[in-house]
Image (cartoon, helix red, strand yellow):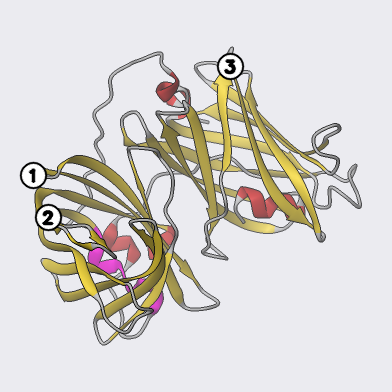
Amino acid sequence: MHAKTMLRTGLLALALTMGWPSSSAAGAARGDDQQHAFDFHFGTWQTRIMSRDVTASGVGAWSNFTGTVIDQPLWNGRANIEKIEASGSGGHFQGVTLFLYDPKSRQWSEQFAGSDDGTMQAPSYGEFSNGVGVFHAWTEAGDKKVLQRDIWSNITPDAYHYEIAVSLDGGKTWTTDFVAQLTRLKKAPDYDVHHAQGTGPEHDFDFNMGQWMTRIRAVPHPLSSPDAWSDLSGTHAAYRLWEDWANIGQLEVDGPGGHLEDLALRLYDRKTQQWRVYFANSKSGTLEQPMVGEFRNGVGTFIGMDEIDGKTVLARNVWSGITAKSCRQDWAISTDGGRTWVPTWTSVDTLGG
């Protein structure tokens, strides 16, 4: 369960695991197995992109970009994270797309964030049939909400086609506003991320990059049994996606409730100088609303909302005791708007074991 779902059961987590499995470990796509529908995507690709604006007042001119797409598998193929960087007549951009598989609906979700503000856009949902993936979402065209359709097609071992279209009339007609043709450069994702040391807020999480061991005490039922604690232990790692605005990690722990896998995607907003932390877990395959916060004087505080036993509560995550080889996290919930807090989770992490 991801950290915010763990709030509901008291197993709160913002620790992050051991790297991504290789594309071979994720397995090849098999027939109508939606869980492996994106296996073709793992690796490093060259992309050629055309993009234009479509609004009720008209259609803009095409801008052209060339760049690189790197896709890394997570959870043995049940999720993947894509990095995009491209330049051209429309400027330069970096982006991150998170793909999550929901085993209940047997559908995938796709959510994108750009380096301009580090905010995940509204998700698109869909599935693959006969080698074609079709996803739908709400988006904005000018100042209007419109339907969006994403299509993955012409998939071969070394190439695929991706395009986005919008509909201004509720799906009766569609106008393409984004086209990408991708050609494989290599099968393995390129994990290397250039990094320069720095002290600005965009480097707040630099201390957390690497392999860690974690020991956890958590409250399974923080509202009904706030004094009943359980012990968990496991591993986590954090990796940079981009140097100074995006990183991701995975938690993998075992305890009385069994084996748990989480991911946390942390995105920096340069305008507000705050971080948004998004959570997901391998069982539900959905991305929760983010917790938002920042570091001050070596302590990071993040606040979000959650629902426990039908109650809407505040959730708080605090990072402290940060050294070169250890750090601590404390989670708590509040049912009275932050006046009082009920502890739900404490973890002590040690670098490398």
Which quarter of the image is occupied by the N terminus? bottom right
Mark 2–mark 3 Cα distance, whole angstroms, equals 40 Å
The quadrant holding residue 52 is bottom left
Q: Residue at x 22, y 72 (%)?
A: 175
Percent coordinates x, y for residue 134 in the rendering: 31, 77
Residue 344 image point, x, y percent: 78, 41
Q: Which residue is mark 3?
A: 296
**Image mark for residue 47:** 2
Q: Residue at x 47, y 78 (%)?
A: 106
In this rendered view, identify the residue nearer to me: 140 or 82. 140
Residue 170: quarter of image: bottom left
Q: Is residue 188 left or right of residue 117?
A: left
Give the mark nearest the N terminus, 1 or 3. 1
Which residue is pictured at 25% across the width and 41% down the height? 94
Give the amino acid at mark 2. Thr
Say which quarter of the image contains residue 318. Answer: top right
Q: Circles 2 and 3: CB distance less than 8 Å?
A: no
**Prevalent SS, magenta region:** helix
> In the image shown, does 83 or 13 lie closer to the viewer?
83
Residue 41 located within the stretch drawn in magenta: yes
Tell which of 17 and 276 is nearer to you: 276
Residue 89 numbered mark, or none: 1
The amino acid type, in three-letter code, at marker 1 is Ser
Q: Residue shown at 72%/58% (left/top)?
A: 257
Work out whether mark 2 precedes mark 1 in sequence or the reverse, and give the earlier one.
2
Residue 352: in sight, yes or no?
no
Segment tinted magenta in the rendering: 34-42
Marks 1 and 3 sit apart, C-alpha to C-alpha, by 40 Å
Q: CA distance from mark 2 to mark 1?
A: 15 Å
